[in-house]
Amino acid sequence: MLAAVDLGSNSFHLIIAKIEHGEMRPVEALAEKVQLGAGLENQLLSREAIDRGLDCLSRFSELLKSVEPERVRVVGTNALRVADNRREFTTPARRILGTRVDVIYGREEARLVYLGVAHTLADDVKSRLVIDIGGGSTELIIGQRFEPQRLESLQMGCVSYGRDCFVDGVINRSNYRQAYDLARTLLTPIRHEYHARHWQDCVGSSGTLRAIDALLTQHGWCDNGIDRVGLRALEDKLLTFETMDDIDMDGLSAQRRNVILPGVAIISALFDVLGIEHMRTSSGALREGVIYDLMGRLSHEDVRERTINALMQRYSVDTDTVHIVERRARVFFTTARQSWQLDTPDWELLRWAAHTHEIGMAIAHKNFNRHSAYVLRNADLPGFSQEEQEHLAVLAMGQRGKLTDEIYRDMATSEIPRIQRLVSIIRLAVCFKHVEKLERLPDFTLEAGPDSLSFTFPPGWLEEHPLTARELASEQEVLAKMGLELVIG
């Protein structure tokens, strides 16, 4: 049993699925219109929106009790991406659900959407454009079979456009044109890469596009899917209403009233700018993509491994050094794991940090740790959440030199002690990398306490290796400021 929770800007979705013969079979599915994005103003979520979301998750949590926590993944999208106070939501959400909340970047959302859609389509070799219109962002992906080739996420969504372009829910042609023109403006920079000449099939994903598809079919404006003629007919019909609350059409639920017209404006701009003639819709979406991605992680086909390997190749990482640092970090981690209450995800993070700690060398040797941290924080890293990238950046930045509280500025207070322990491990592992290139380390004793780590070397070894001895001595001062005693004997 696997479960995925999609914390969208418009709706929250829960799916619990059983995996049979490599395919997922949904067992439970819930969806609630939360409109987290409607409570976003000046990049801050309102208290009311946060409470709506947490109340929804309290209901979801009852079903999630049937699934082991390590088989549940919760992802947050645009509203949580842009909210400066996201932790006011994610911290209590983690307590409610019993698992962490991964806020993902737009292109990672696009990758997962494509994965969910691709598993619902015929396994052919056609190049396809997949479009997902959410509450706060729209994802566009060109791919073949199960592999995305181009990924994009744009800041246009049916909730945000409804809030900003149709103030107080008022409908008129001027408001509609504002939404349409805004979408065209955002699409213009990517129109050449995503134009119809680059793909053969167009597929829509999301509740809004499926609702538009259903309306066009039910009212006889299109035989199947979505086309230009049908869109114009739906647009004309919707513009006869004066407010969002007035919209009354057969086949349109009350929950879709305030997002359907902004959705039509966005998809009309997409058709016109990208040369789309026809779009079919798919039931696959982000939540299904999360399930399939989770299947890969549990079967050791983790896309994050491919991402790290590609990063190492791109920046010509010295693999010998990587293996030395990883091997030493594993010894320290294994010794301290129980006393420091670390677990498997902590080791995965530490191992990826060991593999990428020197990528900044490709930019400059001086302050290479800062360059490594910048790349890890800002690059598109498929498979990684915002939090995971931030933690990797902190481990890269903190591997050498002085440590200040500034490097933890974007981190939840509750996470800092754990990350500090991982920083101490990577720093100590790096201390030994130069001597291990020249000779094998002697057998030494290593012990860990709740707030301590003790080394005991053979007599005379430190005297024979003054550089390593000096580095360890300097680490005593640095780690002491993190509340960790380093004992060297």
Image: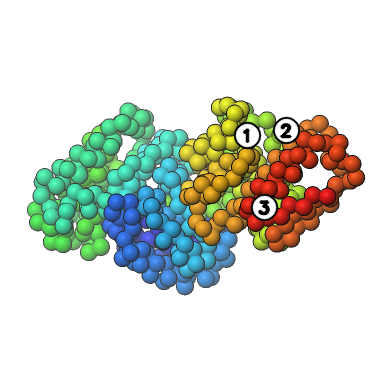
Q: Is residue 447 left or right of residue 281?
A: right
- In the rendered image, residue 318, in percent from the top left (x then y), is placed at 68, 30
> Which circle marks residue 480 in the picture?
3
- Is residue 21 among the parts visible in the rendering? no
Q: Position of residue 97 (x, y in %)?
A: 49, 66
- Label 2's element? helix
Residue tagged by mark 1?
A: 358
Classify 163 as above or below 200: below
Question: Disc 1 to disc 3, how far (Cα)?
Answer: 25 Å
Q: Secondary structure at mark 1?
A: loop
Q: Which mark is residue 320?
A: 2
Mark before the other along the chain sequence, 2 or 1: 2
Residue at the location (43% across, 58% down)? Answer: 87
Tell me the SS state at disc 3: helix
Quarter of the image with the N terminus in it: bottom right
Mark 1, Cα crowd under 10 Å, few <14 / some 14-19 / many 20+, is many
Amino acid bearing label 1: Glu
Drawn side of residue 450 relative to residue 367, left or right:
right
Mark sitting earlier along the chain (3/2): 2
Q: Mark 3 near mark 2, Cβ–Cβ under 8 Å?
A: no
Residue in view at x 27 percent, y 51 percent: 160
Viewer-proximal residue among 48 and 242: 48
Q: Amino acid at mark 2?
A: Asp
Quote the CA–CA distance across marks 2 and 1: 12 Å
Up the image or down, 198 lies above or below 290; here it is: above
Depth check: give the residue in front, 348 or 273.
348
Crowding near pointer 2: few (<14 within 10 Å), some, many (20+)? few
